[in-house]
Image (cartoon, rainbow, N blue to C red):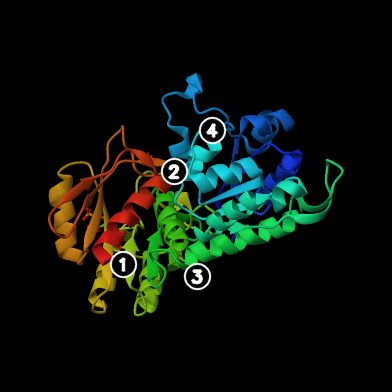
Amino acid sequence: MFKNAHILLGVTGGIAAFKAVELCRRFQKAGAKVRVIMTQAACEFITPLTFETLTHQSVYTDVFDKARAFEIEHVSFAQWGDILVIAPATANMIAKMAAGLADDPLSTTVLAFRGPVVVAPAMNTAMWDNAKTRENLEALRGRGVRLVAPDVGMLACGDEGAGRLANLSDIVQAVTEELEAARQAGPLASKKILITAGPTIEKIDPVRFISNPSSGRMGYALAEEAAKRGAAVTLITGPVFLETSKHLAEVVRVETAEQMRDAVVAHLPEQNVCVFTAAVADFTPAEPIARKIKKEDLGQETVLKLKRAPDVAAAANAARQPGQFFVGFAAETNDLESYARDKMERKGFDLVVGNLVSEANPAFGVKDNEVTIFLPSGATVDLPRTSKKELAKYIWDQIQTQLS
Ligand code: CTP
């Protein structure tokens, strides 16, 4: 569940703050990415440098940090996170959250955050038992905040009773459950989605092939984002050097356009949405040779005969079931809109994501991209230049609007 999850870890000022370091490590070991937010009081107990060293990310400690005034951090942190975990949470932070106050980096992030929140309180027993604290905790629970109750034991102040930060395994378990629940309640929860990604390779002989520089990043990012939103995703991928998200329902690895077509057609009937991001070869060697070709046999020049490779999206369109929603991609160096609309028409795409390919926006083999979405209504939406992971969110937002 943690693989690639974005966890925001909020640390407040209590003696248990040091335990947040181990919690951060546990999240990371499970495959999550962690960014840390600390209150000033937390910085009295433990330094931001500890977390910066562990996470390789700057820690958010000051709403008015002049060095980064261009970035509205409570918003950018809140948008980045899949889940917000506050451990340890002091009585003061719990009171602020209950009241909706926003006067430090963590409480401002809490207000700007839309995802699941897990709170692990740690405080003196008398503070924990205090009626006002109880009322605040109930208010948070009522708003869907997941509480991980503190343990009973010897406290730093010498008192014996409830107030020790919960066992870290219990906090990890609560975070796992909340991530899973968020996935199941996601906007694509009941949807089955097929995505093609990466290049195909077309063999000339056993050691040579024709291919293209597609990295697979766009397709993989779309697959991961759809899975995070609750979809059962089947990823049909050509050879790429990327890890697949653990949350995918199925990953089918293929090499050639023909294999990709066969896999797509075989998985097509049950799908609600198909997204064709793969850069499928348009041509394949007409007569592949079973033995390695020796260059001496070819002389100084040679001609390679090619034939059309199967069109995966067109084959899917021919076998399409009523109600299926198809998304295509168009990478063009010129006349993007007319080519994109033409592909929509020819291949039955309901929506097309178009790139204008140029030196400034190579689109293939790079992490960032700038795209325009062509909607069935004839309208277009220009998305900002950003990472393919961020683009995946924008693209799913647009697809979801069309599905609803
Ligand atoms: N596509 C496919 N199978 C192919 C070629 C393309 O599934 N053999 C899909 C791509 O994944 C993409 C869309 O079709 O979603 C691109 O459409 P297409 O018109 O074939 O574009 P190009 O391959 O760029 O070809 P051209 O512009 O030269 O017609």
Kind of residue indicated by mark 3: Ala
Q: CA distance from mark 1 to mark 4?
A: 53 Å
Taking the view exactly as shown, the residue that stands out farthest to the top is: 66
Instruction: Provide the secondary structure element on which disc 3 rests.
Output: loop
Kind of residue indicated by mark 2: Ala
How many residues crowd around disc 1 within 10 Å: few (fewer than 14), some, or many (20 or more)? many
- Tell me: is circle 4 under 8 Å from ligand 1: no
Mark number displayed over residue 249: 3
How many residues crowd around disc 4 within 10 Å: few (fewer than 14), some, or many (20 or more)? many
The residue depicted at 61 percent of the width and 47 percent of the height is: 86
Residue 381 vs residue 125, the one in the foreground: 125
> Do labels 2 and 4 touch, CB within 8 Å?
no
Residue on which disc 4 sits: 104
Query: Quarter of the picture for ligand 1?
Result: bottom left
How many residues crowd around disc 3 within 10 Å: few (fewer than 14), some, or many (20 or more)? some
How many residues crowd around disc 2 within 10 Å: few (fewer than 14), some, or many (20 or more)? some
Residue on which disc 2 sits: 112
Q: CA distance from mark 4 to mark 3?
A: 41 Å
Q: Position of residue 268 (x, y in %)?
A: 35, 76
Is residue 92 toward the left or the right of residue 18 in the image?
left
Q: Compared to 103, does 363 lie above or below?
A: below
Instruction: Provide the secondary structure element on which disc 4 rests.
Output: loop
Residue on which disc 1 sits: 312
Residue 261 picture quarter: bottom left
Is residue 350 toward the left or the right of residue 165 in the image?
left
